[in-house]
Amino acid sequence: MTITPLADNLVETSETVVFALTANAAYILGSADSATVTIADSGPAPQARPMISVADVTVGEDQTYADFIVRLSAPGTQTVSVRALNSQGTASFNTDYVHGDTTLNFAVGETVKTVRVILRDDTVAEATESFFLDLVSAVNADIGNSQATATIIDNDGTPGTPLVLVTAPDASASEVGLDPGSFVITRSGGAQNLALDVSVTLSGSTATNGADYAQISGIVTIPANQASLTVAVTPLADNAAEGNETVVLALVANAAYSLGTPTSATVTIADSGSFKHGDGEMASHRHVAAQWQGAGHRGICWCGVI
């Protein structure tokens, strides 16, 4: 006979089942007229570990601090801990905020903790900046959202005046294939529903506006309802061996906008290449197709020509 336990959700101690024979005229009982089977309890039902996450926050630069809220998805049955530390984004630690590294301890039943990061208010007109809070090394919990962003809104631009800055997201152009680079001029604040004319200057090492790259105007217009404008740096082919050249676009101050950071950016134009004569003189190279014939075979050879 088999004793088959039935599962339940109760927390119990081990239990016993005694099977005993009963006397009957049809048989004689032996000495072992009973036997015992012990059923071990399955123990407490396993509980899922709580998830720990942190939420984004947006603050003004003059708000003194940023509060990150860290939550457990459910109360833990034992103490939960996690390390919380800042990492740098576009905001700089100890310039825009005070770097922190701490360990949060959630007692049994606790589900919310706050990490407070001190902000530093300056007098520099800047674009919106950000930094991060990272959660690592959790104990007795699993990490869900491990990183949150603190967005800092600048308070130093002239009210109603847009803040303008320039970057070079594609800082490499090349004469080979006439591969362009690019600047991006971005504005924030002000009347976004109006077009904005931004004055710029172009300089660099030996690159000349309109000669080494397609002409870029000294006035760049960001269209209405658009936050940024891409300015392409398109190389123009030449036969000169000149080495790499740089193009520097710098913003010019204007009453129509405030200058943010950075106010200039650089794109490098790679030269199409060069090679040397036997005497060491540099020369640009090109290729021509020449036919050859010999030993009953004919073909075409691409040869470098000085």
Image (tube, helix red, strand yellow):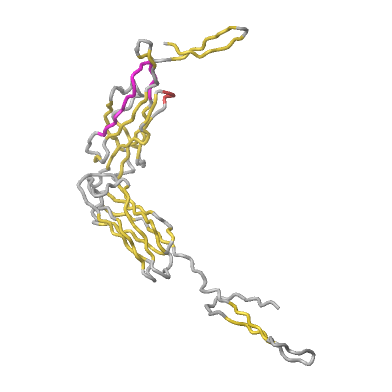
For image coordinates 19% across by 47% down, the residue present is: 123
In-front residue for pair 20/218:
20
Q: Quadrant of residue 300?
A: top right
Q: Is residue 244 magenta?
A: yes
Q: Is residue 99 magenta?
A: no
Residue 102 image position (x, y, % from top left) = 30, 59
For image coordinates 60% across by 75% down, the residue present is: 7
Residue 24 image position (x, y, % from top left) = 76, 91
> Which quadrant would the N terminus be assigned to in this image?
bottom right
Q: Is residue 9 left or right of residue 272?
A: right
In-front residue for pair 2/302:
2
Region in magenta: 235-251
Q: Quadrant of residue 71?
A: bottom left
Instruction: Using the image, determine if residue 123 lies above or below residue 18.
Output: above
For this orientation, the residue located farthest to the left is 123
> Which quadrant would the C terminus be assigned to in this image?
top left
Residue 19 image position (x, y, % from top left) = 67, 84
For this orientation, the residue located farthest to the front is 31
